[in-house]
Amino acid sequence: MTAQHAFADALLHWFDQHGRSHLPWQHNRTPYRVWVSEIMLQQTQVTTVIPFYERFMAAFPTVQDLAVAPEDTVLHLWTGLGYYARARNLHRSAKTICADHDGRFPENLDDLVSLPGIGRSTAGAILCLAMGGRAPILDGNVKRVLARYYAVEGWPGQRTVSDQLWALAEHHTPHQRVADYTQAVMDLGATCCKRTQPTCPTCPLQANCSALATQNQTAFPGRKPQKPKPSRQRWFAVAIRSSGEVLLQKRAANGIWGGLWAPPELSDERSAKEWLHHNVGVSAAECYLGTPFHHVFTHFKLEATPVYGRCAENQTHSPSVKFDDNDLRWFGLDPVPSVGLPAPIVRLLKTLGNDA
């Protein structure tokens, strides 16, 4: 038996005894269900994903249902999961699949990768797990297994390291039981070859693992070079009607919180007060500050302060401002609006009564 076959055979033997079979996307596997799960699982823990996945599938059981859904509904069901570009790309891809592929997923790697938000690993998972095809995958779990087994040095985000790991993933992907192997290598990384405290004595690959041989498991894969995260200070203009409604603005599709609803964001306190005065007729003297809140993004830390302004139901505002249109709209607070909202804004709206 070659080393290539021994690797896959050991994994499959382990999988038959210890592999996961309780995850919701493992049942009634279709390209659509696998795709949604793979996108949700990017940079997100399984335990976090499961309730979001179940709600998403209940609302959009087919790709056709997702394609015709309003964007606000899609983003609302994603609220709290983060990385909202994933949801927007799911929606865009669903529309493309229905419009250009008659509602059926493409059956080759290149066509799948051409869809918004689908990379090589996600496409490989769809082909292997739901279509009976053969293609390597390289998610975070697989990177960790291969990097440790071969002691591949360097951060996987570097091109040379990524190319090496992809070559190894291709080398080990078998031609038989491809779906089981694909699930097995992901399961091994998630349950045994964990980022911290790996359970090496139970690993089916321990006999030839290079990292284990040197007792240096947690050094692989290499960490991303760390840079200090800059802080950004922002002020949110929170207009509140006497009836208890709050004015929210739909953010531009691109950028942080793209396509989500939030109070208008300004660069300083004075600008926030001027916005409230100009648009809802609240003077600067009538405005007051709420409790600051913080949120950490991938590349920076947000330090935010709400600036509150109460206005009457019929209070005048600038005729240039369009209310109740697609970009600026009054929403009730009980319950929290059923549109796409950033998690910090959900918390702000829930506690609005305490500050306002």
Image: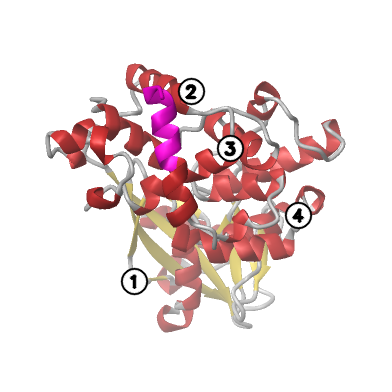
Amino acid at dot 4: Pro
First reached walking from the N terminus: tag 3 or tag 1: 3
Q: Are marks 4 and 2 in contact (CB under 8 Å)?
A: no
Q: Which residue is mark 3?
A: 177
Q: Which residues fall within the magenta stretch?
A: 1-11
Using the image as rendered, state which of residue 272 and residue 45 is in the foreground: 45
| Above or below: residue 296 compared with residue 157 | below
Q: Which residue lies at the image location 60% right of the left edge and 66% below the top edge?
A: 247
Q: Quadrant of the N terminus?
A: top left
From the image, state whether disc 3 or disc 2 is nearer to you: 3
- The alpha-carbon separation of the residues under discs 1 and 4 comes to 33 Å
Closer to the chain start, of discs 3 and 4, is 4
Q: Dot 1 lies on which element? A: loop
- Mark 3, mark 1: which one is toward the viewer? 3
Asked which quadrant contains residue 206, the reply is top left
Q: Residues within 10 Å of mark 3 (few under 14, many from 20)?
A: some
Instruction: Give the side of residue 256 with respect to residue 30, left or right.
Output: left
